[in-house]
Each structure stands twice: as structure tokens, then as C-alpha cells.
Image (cartoon, rainbow, N blue to C red):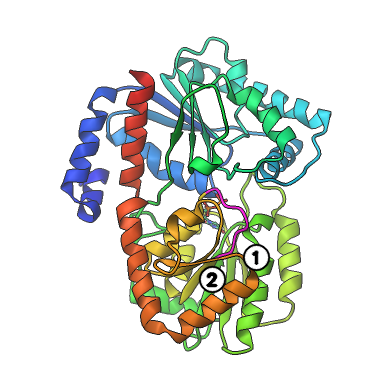
């Protein structure tokens, strides 16, 4: 069975046939995606399934990852924070390092990038590449996965100069899009229901999780899965947990790891552990970035999944949990708002107090918890699976190329 036939069992034959029709004009087209990490974070997650599926549809797709220095990644993390609204200081040496690393990567990827019909550059890290590929013949598209709705202006001004020459840009939500002199497209991300992260897991595998991670199967489990990042607000999650603990013996799992392009993780982990203190019911777990099955299992054994971000480009962890029929208590921000339909597929919250209130409510009203989880699953089936995402990519490729 081909990869696509496997998806037909979930979304139906018609959807797959539609994708094949859309890909008919794109046969043999050379498409290159470039980002800055192969593991960790939502972008890598998407590229892992997008490339093989495009290839199966006859598109000559490939994925390249840029390499960088520590100062480069410190600077791009600063840029990321700045785009999400934090006031940051831009040092001239860092700006020069950003361009130098892009130039170095342009050198090693030159042939591939010059020959491509279409290049997708993901996020700010590799955004300066086209300026070092003067003989590019294809179209270049910048794909922004970040909540840039209220950027710190000097950061956006710096980045905008690199992004303006692109043929188009793609954003996850209309609120994020910034004025640019080229067509802007909106494409929401998605999850792969057949990946290790999302496939169904057997009863035995899930039961083994309790013993393996020292969890009590008799007491409720609340989980947040995410990189240890200030905007994911893990400390706010601990505060919410403590408020609920006064009434209910819940357990909290904060499962995360780092991403190769995120240098701030370690400091955040230290702060989270300090906040958790000696409480044996707070499980701060550092998982290898490719341990998708364990994340999958944690999402499945949880009663409620929380994603209390204060800024969020999209929040694939929200989609993943909803697919597993879990109601999500999510920060009222960015892409979480697209997924959590307040009071239907979960609850939107703006504070630890709000999160605590909703956790208590759901634990007390189990029927509603189950009903919301089911609605969440159907909402993802309709809106946030790879097949919808792929259809929008194929349509966009027609719009840009023909
Ligand atoms: N993830 C993971 N291991 C971790 C933390 C996160 O595999 O320790 C995955 C998570 O399951 C999700 C992605 O990384 O698929 C994070 O994407 P999201 O859009 O939620 O946030 P980002 O990290 O891109 O800001």
C-alpha cells in the first residue's frame, strides 16, 4: 500500500484523488524546503511528513537544514522572541553573524537552490539565503510559523528587508501577517495521524507508562508537552496545578525537550525545576527530541492536556492532543484560538487562575470532558490533518508557478 492509500482509510478516497488531480501539473517540479533543525519543534515535525508525501505525488521535493554557530542561534532566538513582541537588543555583531552564516549556507546549498523551481524558506533563520543566490531561477516563498502579530518593530524592520524580495509569503493566521509587497497566503499547519506521534497505541503500551514514569493510574493526569520556552509558560502551568491541588490529588506532567535551534531551553528548565521543588507529583521530563511515541502515550494517558502559551505560532501540541480526543485548556492566543473553540473543543484561558478553574470544572464534569474530547477529535479530522495542508500547498504552488 502506498503512503497516500493509508491516509484514504482516515479521510476517504475522494480526498486522496483530489490531491492526485492537483499534483498532475506539478510532476517533476523541483521543490526545496529549508529550515534550521531536523528535530524538535513544529516546523521539523511538519517537514518530516510533507516531503515524502510530495514525493509520492510526483513532485521532486527535498529538505535541507542550514547549519549555524552558537552566536547565530542565540541571535535567531532573539529575533524569534522579538517577532513575538519581546523588546530585545540587536547588536551589530549579531546582525553581521546572521548574514555571514546565511552566506556560508548559501555557498554549500548553491547548486540545489539555483536549480530549484520553488524554494520554501521556513522562519527567520535561513531568510537571508536568497540574497546570496543571485542566479536563482525559481520562485522563493517565505513561510513564517511565528506569531508576529505585534512584533518588536526594530526586529521586524531588520527581517523585512530580507523578506521583501520573496515572491510570496505564507502565514498561519491573518492576524500574524505583516504588510509586504508580494502576495500573502494563509495556511494553517496540521498533524500526521499516521506518525509515531499520533498513531493509536495499544492498551499494554499505555498501561506500562504509569510504572515506567512513576505515575498513579488512579489519579488524574494533566499534561503540557512543549519546548521549555518562556512563551509556553510552564511556570504558569505549575501555578495552576498548585491551585487545583488544594482540592484534587492531580498529577502534572511537563514533558519537553530542546530543539537544536533553541539555545534558551536549559535556563528555562532550571527555572521550571526550581519552581517544581520537591513535589513528587510534578514530573518534569526531558525527552529526546525523537521520542515521539512517549509524547504520544503521555497525551493519551492524560485526562486533560494543557497548552498555556502566552504567544503561540500555531501549537501542534494542541492539535495532537485534540486528535487523541482530549479537551485542551489553551492560552487565548495565536493559533490556539483556531483550534480550541471555547467551551466546545476545550477552554481558552488567560491566567493560571483561569486554567485552574477549567481543570477543576472538567474533572468534576466527566461527561462534558468526554464530549469535548470527541468534538476535538472531529474538529482535527475536518481541519488539521496533513491532507488538508497538502491540498493547500498544491493549490498555492499552482498560484505561484502558473
Ligand atoms: N515536541 C516533541 N518533544 C518535546 C517537545 C515538543 O516531540 O519534548 C513536539 C510536539 O509534540 C509538537 C512539536 O514538537 O509536535 C512542537 O510544535 P508546536 O507547534 O506545539 O510548538 P513549537 O515548538 O513549534 O513552538
What's the magenta region?
Answer: 307-313
Q: Nearer the viewer, residue 350 or 45?
A: 350
Q: Nearer the viewer, residue 266 or 170?
A: 170
> Would residue 37 appear left or right of 264 to someone viewing this image?
left
The residue at label 2 has a CB less than 8 Å from ligand 1: no
> Label 1: how many residues lie within 10 Å, few (<14), some (14-19) or many (20+)?
many
Residue that appears at 61% across and 56% down = 227
Q: In this rendering, is residue 258 above or below 357? A: above
Answer whether residue 311 is magenta in the image: yes
- Residue under pointer 2: 223
Q: In this rendering, is residue 377 above or below 382? A: below
Q: Residue furthest top?
A: 135
Residue 290 placement (x, y as % from top left):
51, 54
Residue that appears at 63% across and 24% down = 162
The quarter of the picture where residue 50 lies is top left
> Label 2: how many residues lie within 10 Å, few (<14), some (14-19) or many (20+)?
many
Residue 368 placement (x, y as % from top left):
38, 78
Please tell me whether mark 2 sits on a helix, a strand or a loop.
Answer: strand
> Would residue 54 appear left or right of 262 to someone viewing this image?
left
Q: Quadrant of the C terminus?
A: top left
Disc assigned to residue 234: 1
Q: Nearer the viewer, residue 395 or 31?
A: 395
Earlier sequence position, callout 2 versus callout 1? 2
Amino acid at each position: 500500500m502506498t503512503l497516500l492509500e493509508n491516509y484514504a482509510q482516515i479521510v476517504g478516497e475522494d480526498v486522496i484523488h483530489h490531491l492526485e488531480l492537483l499534483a498532475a501539473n506539478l510532476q517533476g517540479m523541483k521543490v526545496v524546503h529549508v529550515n534550521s533543525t531536523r528535530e524538535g519543534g513544529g516546523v521539523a515535525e511538519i517537514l518530516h511528513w510533507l516531503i515524502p508525501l510530495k514525493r509520492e505525488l510526483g513532485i521532486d521535493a527535498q529538505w535541507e537544514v542550514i547549519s549555524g554557530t552558537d552566536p547565530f542561534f542565540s541571535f535567531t532566538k532573539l529575533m524569534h522572541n522579538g517577532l513575538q513582541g519581546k523588546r530585545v537588543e540587536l547588536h551589530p555583531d549579531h546582525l553581521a553573524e546572521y548574514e555571514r552564516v546565511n552566506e556560508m549556507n548559501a555557498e554549500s546549498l548553491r547548486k540545489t537552490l539555483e536549480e530549484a523551481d520553488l524554494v520554501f524558506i521556513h522562519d527567520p533563520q535561513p531568510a537571508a539565503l536568497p540574497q546570496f543566490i543571485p542566479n536563482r531561477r525559481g520562485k522563493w516563498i517565505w513561510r513564517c510559523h511565528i506569531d508576529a502579530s505585534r512584533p518588536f518593530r526594530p526586529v521586524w524592520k531588520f527581517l523585512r528587508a530580507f523578506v521583501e524580495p520573496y515572491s510570496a509569503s505564507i502565514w498561519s493566521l491573518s492576524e500574524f501577517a505583516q504588510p509586504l509587497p508580494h502576495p500573502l497566503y494563509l495556511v494553517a499547519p496540521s498533524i500526521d495521524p499516521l506518525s509515531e506521534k499520533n498513531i493509536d497505541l495499544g492498551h499494554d503500551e499505555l498501561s506500562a507508562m504509569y510504572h515506567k514514569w512513576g505515575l498513579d493510574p488512579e489519579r488524574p493526569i494533566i499534561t503540557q508537552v512543549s519546548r521549555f520556552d518562556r512563551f509556553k509558560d510552564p511556570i504558569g502551568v505549575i501555578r495552576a496545578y498548585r491551585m487545583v491541588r488544594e482540592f484534587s490529588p492531580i498529577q502534572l506532567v511537563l514533558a519537553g525537550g530542546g530543539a537544536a535551534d533553541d539555545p534558551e531551553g536549559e535556563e528555562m528548565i532550571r527555572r521550571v525545576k526550581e519552581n517544581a521543588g520537591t513535589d513528587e507529583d510534578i514530573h518534569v521530563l526531558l525527552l529526546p527530541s525523537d521520542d515521539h511515541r512517549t509524547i504520544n502515550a503521555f497525551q493519551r494517558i492524560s485526562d486533560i492536556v494543557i497548552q498555556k502559551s502566552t504567544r503561540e505560532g500555531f501549537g501542534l501540541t494542541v492539535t495532537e492532543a485534540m486528535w487523541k480526543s482530549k479537551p485542551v485548556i489553551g492560552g487565548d492566543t495565536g493559533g490556539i484560538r483556531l483550534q480550541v473553540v471555547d467551551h466546545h473543543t476545550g477552554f481558552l484561558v488567560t491566567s493560571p487562575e483561569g486554567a485552574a478553574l477549567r481543570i477543576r470544572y472538567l474533572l468534576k464534569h466527566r461527561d462534558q470532558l468526554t464530549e469535548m474530547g470527541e468534538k476535538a477529535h472531529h474538529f482535527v479530522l475536518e481541519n488539521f490533518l496533513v491532507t488538508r495542508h497538502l491540498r493547500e500547498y498544491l493549490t498555492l504552488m499552482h498560484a505561484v508557478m502558473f
